[in-house]
Image (tube, grey):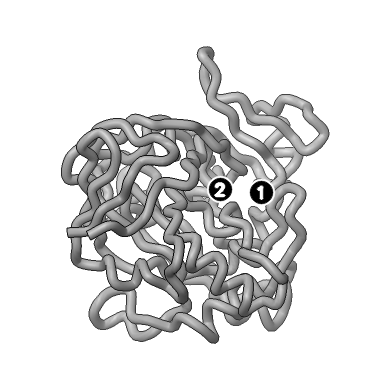
Amino acid sequence: MTAGTVRSLHRHPLKSALGEEIAHARITGRGLDGDRVRALLDTATGRVVSAKNPRLWRALLTVTARTTPHGIRLLAADGRELDEAGLTALLGREVRAVDVPPPGAELERSVPEEVLDRGADAEVTSTVHVLGSAAPPGTFFDFAPVHLVSTATLAALGEGTGTGGPVAAARYRPNLVVDTPGRRGFPENGWVGRELRIGDGVRLEVLAATPRCAVPTLAHGALPRDLEALRAAARLNRVEPLPGTGPMPCAGVYARVLAGGTVRRGDAVSLR
C-alpha cells in the first residue's frame, strides 16, 4: 500500500541545535548517517542539554549545526563559529560537547502545559527521562532513531493554528517528511505497529506516535515563537503514544530500522 513519497530529509548533527536539509542519506540501525552524533552536557548536573527545558536551553535553537568533511561546524545566528567556550557564553551555563552519552544519560523535560501557561522563562515542573529506550546504546535519541511526519499532519496543524498554510516541519524536528497527497488529518497514526519500506531497501518498524513537548512552540532560528504549534496538536490529535501513557498531543511517529540503505527525495514510501 502506497503511503506517499519522501518530500525532504533532515538531520541534526548536534542535539537540540538547528539542523540541515539534505538530498539523500544513508540509514543504518542508528538512524540517518550524521544525525544526533553529538550533544552537550551540563557540567553542573551531568545531564544532556535539551531544549525540552526551554528556560535553560532554548538559546541552542539559535545555533546551526553543519556537517563538513572536517567534522561538525557550529554557527551562531550572526555567523560566528562556536566552540565550547562560545556555547557556554551563549547558554549562560558551562557545557561540554560529547560524542558518546555517559552511562544512564538523562535529560530534563519541562511540563509543556506549564510552559504554555507561564512562559519559556518561568521555572516550571520538569520530569527526568533516560535517553533512547528504543534506540541503540550510545546514541542521543530521545526514544527511537528515526522520526517521520507527514505533509497531511503539517497541513492539519497549520489549519488548527490559523496560519493559512502548513506548519514548518522544522518545528517538529523530523528526519523524514513524507508527502501524503490527498490525505487529511494525521495519517501516520495508522502506521504504528506496521512496516514502512523506503528507497534502497530501507525498512522501518513504526513504534509509536510522537508526543510533543514545548520545543515546537519555541523560536527556531528565523521562525518566531508560536504557542499554537503545540496547542493545535493538543486540540486535534490527542492519542496514546504507548499503552499506559494516556492521551498526549502527538504529531509524527517514531520508528526503528529493520534494514538499512539509502533514502532520497522523491523515493516511494509504502506501508505493509
The one nearer the camera, 232 or 107, is 232
Q: Amino acid at mark 1?
A: Leu
Q: In the drawing, does residue 117 fall left or right of residue 210?
A: right
Residue 159, position as x, y percentages in the image: 63, 76
Quarter of the image with the C terminus in it: bottom left
> Which label is found at residue 157?
none
Q: Quadrant of residue 86?
A: top right
- Residue 46 visible somewhere in the drawing: no
Residue type pointed to by label 2: Ser
Q: Where residue 105 sits in the image (x, y, percent)?
A: 37, 49
Residue at numbered disc 1: 61
- Bin the neighbour count of mark 1 within 10 Å (Cα to Cα): few under 14, some 14-19, many 20 and up: many
Name the residue at 31% across, 53% down: 144
At a point 19% along the width and 56% down the height, the residue shown is 195
- Looking at the image, is 246 positioned above or below residue 81? below
10 vs 13, nearest the viewer? 10
Residue 257 against residue 53 in the figure, above or below: above
**Mark 2 lies on residue:** 16
Q: Is residue 94 above or below residue 83?
A: below
Q: Is residue 257 visible?
A: yes
Near-viewer residue (269 or 239):
269
Assess whether mark 1 and mark 2 are in contact (beta carbons under 8 angstroms).
yes
Residue 51 screen position, x and y as percent: 59, 56
Q: Is residue 25 left or right of residue 8?
A: left
SS for dot 2: loop
